[in-house]
Amino acid sequence: MEEKTAHEIAAIFSAAGDSVTLINTDANFAAYGTRTGSSDTETEWKAMIQRNTEHLEIIKAYTKVDGTTSIWTSESFTAIDAAITTGKAIYS
């Protein structure tokens, strides 16, 4: 296994932004239904929020090959941390 490149790390961080956007945009079931026109149930919506929240937690925990050193350097996790808090409040 090799260390992730700066490009790979940037792509991972960008993907985290997609989950942040989803959680923040759909922070309540009514908003989700209105925006998407989806026939998902509230239970299905909460499961989607949970998957994205857990995705953010996994991304935050990424380490280098040594298994202890974080891959993250100067990235700001303010928006990610807020989305995790929001997401957990939704599905808890």
Image (cartoon, rainbow, N blue to C red):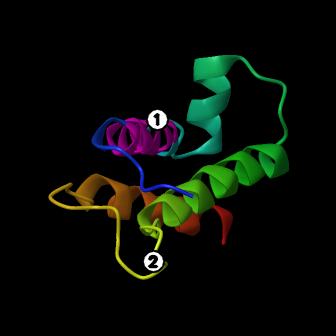
Q: In which quarter of the image is the N terminus?
A: bottom right
Q: Which residue is drawn at 29% across and 61% down?
A: 72
Residue at far front of view: 1
Magenta-drawn stretch contains 15:
yes
Residue topped by disc 2: 66
Nearer to us: label 2 or label 1: 2
Amino acid type at circle 1 is Asp
Which residue type does callout 2 highlight? Asp
Q: In this view, does 34 lie above or below 6?
A: above
Q: Nearer the viewer, residue 60 or 17?
A: 60
Q: Position of residue 12 (x, y in %)?
A: 43, 43
Q: Residue furthest left?
A: 74
32 left or right of 81 in image:
right
- Please give the name of the residue rendered at 76% of the width and 22% of the height, measured from the top-left corner: 38
Residue 70: name its quadrant: bottom left
The image shows residue 78 at horizontal and vertical percentages of 24, 60
Task: Determine the main secondary structure of the stretch shown in magenta.
Answer: helix
The residue to which callout 1 is attached is: 18
Pointer 2 with pointer 1, Cβ within 8 A? no
* Magenta region, residue range: 8-22
Which residue does the image show at 54% across and 68% down from the upper left? Answer: 89
Choose the circle earlier in sequence order: 2 or 1.
Answer: 1
Magenta residue check for 1:
no
Taking depth in this image into account, of 86 and 53 the one nearest to the observer is 53
Judged from the image, the secondary structure of the residue bearing numbered disc 1 is: helix
Residue 49 circle label:
none
Q: Is residue 3 above or below residue 18?
A: below
The x, y position of residue 63, in whole percent, is 44, 69
